[in-house]
Image (cartoon, rainbow, N blue to C red):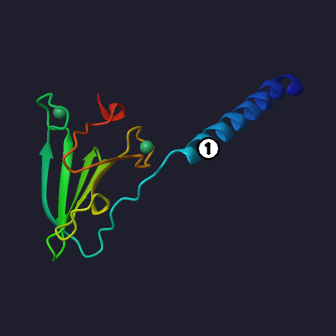
Amino acid sequence: MTFLYNKPYSCNAIILGFCLALSSVQAVAVTNFEPPKLDGFNLHAERDADGDKDGVNETHIKQYFNTSGDSIVSMSIKDKVWAWSLNTLNNDSGDKNFVIRDSNCDGQFNEVYGLDDEFHVPDCLKK
Ligand SMILES: [Ca+2]
Ligand SMILES: [Ca+2]
């Protein structure tokens, strides 16, 4: 009885391990962007915004400034940050002014946008 009960469980464990190995290989191929460092930045304002234009303010926005006037903005829904932006005053190049977005809610910011680009609430955080 014990053998018959355990055997399918062992097979599932092997299949699960295989699936996990496959998904970690895929993760390596995805580019991940580091959230901006908040060192030297202070929370300036918080508000709720409508990021998907449905009339409901689903996204909580926190804006931080440092003494140079650079700003960092986080966008979150229910404490899950889905995007960060960094806007520096003294450097207009793309690498110091960007938005990064977690498109699939796995905690890794895998998409990058310019500050003027259009970007949306990821589908995984929509009701
Ligand atoms: Ca909305
Ligand atoms: Ca992601």
Picture quadrant of residue 24:
top right
Quadrant hosting ligand 2: top left
The residue positioned 14% from the left and 31% from the top of the image is 53
- Give the x, y percent position of residue 30: 51, 45
Q: Nearer the viewer, residue 38 or 27?
A: 27
In this view, 7 is above or below 23 = above
Q: Quadrant of the C terminus?
A: top left
- Give the x, y percent position of residue 52: 19, 32
Q: Nearer the viewer, residue 113 or 80?
A: 113
Picture quadrant of residue 118:
top left
Three-letter amino acid code at the position of disc 1 = Ser
Q: Quadrant of the N terminus?
A: top right
Q: Tell me the SS state at disc 1.
A: helix
The residue positioned 32% from the left and 35% from the top of the image is 122
Q: Circle 1 is placed at which residue position?
A: 24
- Give the x, y percent position of residue 70: 18, 68
- Give the x, y percent position of residue 107: 43, 48
The residue positioned 18% from the left and 71% from the top of the image is 90
Q: Residues within 10 Å of mark 1 (few under 14, many from 20)?
A: few
The residue positioned 79% from the left and 24% from the top of the image is 8
Residue 80 appears in the picture as rendered: no
**Direction front: furthest residue:** 93
Residue 24 appears in the picture as rendered: yes
Quick check: is the Cβ at mark 1 less than 8 Å away from ligand 2?
Answer: no
Q: How many marks?
A: 1
Q: Nearer the viewer, residue 124 or 37?
A: 37
